[in-house]
Each structure stands twice: as C-alpha cells, then as structure tokens.
Amino acid sequence: MPRTLTLSPSLVEQLLTHARRDHPDEACGVIAGPDYNSPTRFVPMVNAARSPTFYEFDSGDLLRLYRDMDDRDEVPSVIYHSHTATEAYPSRTDIAYASEPDAHYVLVSTRETGNHDGPYELRSFHIVEGVVTEDEVVVVS
C-alpha cells in the first residue's frame, strides 16, 4: 500500500547538496526521526564503497548511528542514496539489501546535472521482501 513521505524543504536541500557534492560517487545517509513518518534529523554518511554505481555504509559508522538513534529514541525514517547515471529507482542490489521494512528508501538522481544546480529526480519507496512500492513525496515547510 503506498504511503506518503513528508519532507521539509531544508531536508530536501541537504539531501541534494550531499548528492551533488559526492557526485560522481553515490551519496548515502539517513534521516532519523521519532517514528517512520516523521523524518527530522539529517545524517549524511560516507559511502564506504566510494563507487558511482553502489553504496555501502561503513559498518562502524552504522553501528554508531544506530546507538545514537537508540539514545535519542529515533528510528531511520529515511534511508537515502543517490544514483549518478540512472533514474531514481531502486536497483536489484538496492532491493536485495533493503533491510528496514518500515523505512522510506529515498533515491535522488544526479544524472542530468552532476555536481551542479538544476533539475533532479527524487523518489521514495517502500521495499519489503523484494516488493517495491512507490511512496508519494510531499515537501512542506
């Protein structure tokens, strides 16, 4: 069943800035919040794979993030990454590695503009047991 992801303009801008800065490698990170429908705290991560076609969280960084979220009573509302040469849609690898069934998986494509301002594609998905459902994304101040 499709869901709605509500993001502030500030969170969208931070996500785009991170994706453009890391281009041509994929950027990745988390937006934490008190529940899965309330993303509030932007947490950019390092793509340990340093790859234009794959992202991987550093295991130590990820452990620290989950401990920090636990201390703050937060969950990973959004798990995001960028695609640098393809549309903002989960790849087979993205689908296989999706392990947070309640999180929004957000993809932003920087394929048209790379490191520069301009058009972008931002989409959100719910991925459970290999099934991908697109979520509506609403940007609200």
Image (cartoon, grey):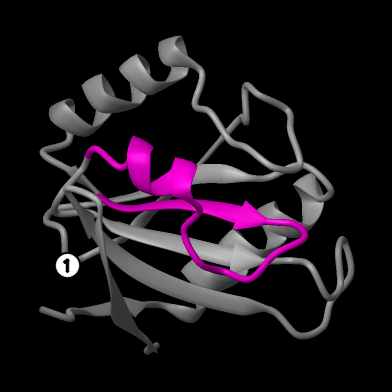
Q: Is residue 87 magenta?
A: yes
> Which residue is most to the top?
60
Q: Left or right: where does residue 30 sit relative to residue 66?
A: right
* Residue 139 picture location, percent across and down: 41, 87
| Amino acid at the residue labelled 1 | Asn
**Quarter of the image holding residue 71?**
top left
Q: Residue at x 79, y 68 (%)?
A: 111
Residue 122 in view (yes/no): yes
Q: How crowded is mark 1: few (under 14 residues within 10 Å), some or many (20 or more)?
A: many
**Quarter of the image holding residue 59?**
top left
Q: What element carries label 1?
A: loop
* Residue 132 picture location, percent across and down: 28, 64
Q: Left or right: where does residue 19 sit relative to residue 129?
A: right
Q: Quadrant of the N terminus?
A: bottom left
Depth order, front residue of 62/93 = 93
Residue 43 in view (yes/no): no
Q: Residue at x 49, y 26 (%)?
A: 57
Q: Residue at x 20, y 66 (%)?
A: 38
Q: In which quarter of the image is the C terminus?
A: bottom left
* Residue 113 picture location, percent across and down: 86, 73
Q: Which residue is drawn at 81% across and 50% down?
A: 23
Q: Left or right: where does residue 37 sit relative to residue 106?
A: left
Q: How many labels does the image show?
A: 1
The residue carrying mark 1 is: 37
* Residue 116 picture location, percent across and down: 89, 69
Looking at the image, is 64 positioned above or below residue 78?
Answer: above
Region rendered in magenta: 77-99
Q: Left or right: where does residue 37 sit relative to residue 76?
A: left
